[in-house]
Image (cartoon, rainbow, N blue to C red):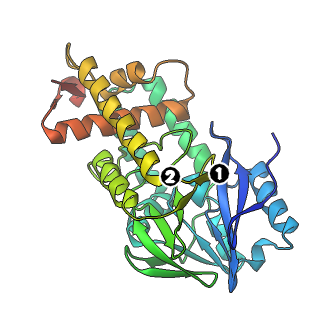
Amino acid sequence: MRSSPPREVAPGIVQIPVPIPYPMGYVNCYLVRGDGIALVDTAMDTPEGRAALEGALAELGLSLSDLDQAILTHHHPDHYGLSGLIEAAGAEVWLLDAEERTGHRFWLEYEPWLRASVEQFRQHGAPLEGLEGMAQAMWLTRRQVHPPQHPKTVSDGQTLDIAGFAFRVLWTPGHADGHMALLRDDGVLLAGDHLLERITPNIGLWAYSRPNPLGDYLESLEKVRGLGARLALVGHFGPVISDIPKRAAELRAHHQGRLSDLLTLLEGSPQTAWELSLKLFSGQLSFVQRRFAWAETLAHLEYLRQQGSIQAERGGQEVIRYSR
């Protein structure tokens, strides 16, 4: 499947779809051209991805060394993976301060976080073959990620100059602890993966996450819904969502439905997050997909637990089970 050519989707902003090895197929990177040249999100280092990004830049008369800035909405590999190489080519790399302290550190200190992640999977019921498959998939991903060595940080509410345009920085945790959206004065929102058009952003609870990512996400939806932005440029599909309040309401309703489904599944005996994920996300999934399904199930369970609707108990081998 060939990438679409780069195209202008808002004044001074060009969409560059880059292939990624995930079911979404592509990540949308955005080239901002004004008083300078910036790339918002970078894709990951696969042969197809790097060739597509460099080819799109070449169509625009540019190369990686022409970029003045790389702005990272969050640390997930399809948005962050090539940022270290772009930094080495001469660009400043920017991310939210909260993401520098968490997601960025995850890639710099990968081995201990991998051990903690595998132990978290085990405590929540993942079988041995699942643990081994997830660890292998995570190591493969790590080889496709080049963390920046000297990123610059910005805080929620500050203004960030991106290629001569002023963008207000918005901390929108949920999909990632340090997820950042960026709002321009003309109402254009660079939304990253906070809002998506055809699918719902994965909201997962990981070993290094804040304790209630779904609660964070629902609050962030309200924050973005009330901005008055006229369109959102999103990380996958789209690239444009023109009715942000409507999409935010749809995403909230989706998660409320998932919470209701979990409460129904828990009407019987106590179950692990792994067991519940197999029911909530049935069908054949790859190890990567199953890991996301498990983490999303766990995020919803912990939201319900912190709301007082369910409880968690440790049983044999310290495995955690949830019940009404």
Amino acid tagged 2: Asp
Residue tagged 1: 27
- Asked whether disc 2 touches disc 1, contact meaning CB atoms under 8 Å apart, the reply is no
Task: Tell me: residue 297, above or below residue 50.
Answer: above
Q: Is residue 247 left or right of residue 98?
A: right
Which is more toward the observer, 125 or 202?
202
Query: What residue would you read off at disc 2?
Result: 243
Which quadrant of the figure has residue 51? bottom right
Eye-nearest disc, 2 or 1: 2
User: Which residue is rendered at x = 66% and y = 64% of the image?
Assistant: 30
Dot 1 falls on a residue whose secondary structure is: strand
Q: Is residue 3 visible?
A: yes
Instruction: Estimate the x, y position of residue 313 in percent, counting from the top left.
Output: 15, 29
Dividing the image into 4 quarters, which one contains the C terminus?
top left
Q: Position of residue 15 (x, y in %)?
A: 70, 60
- Label 1 is placed on what type of residue? Val
Q: Is residue 74 above or below residue 218?
A: below
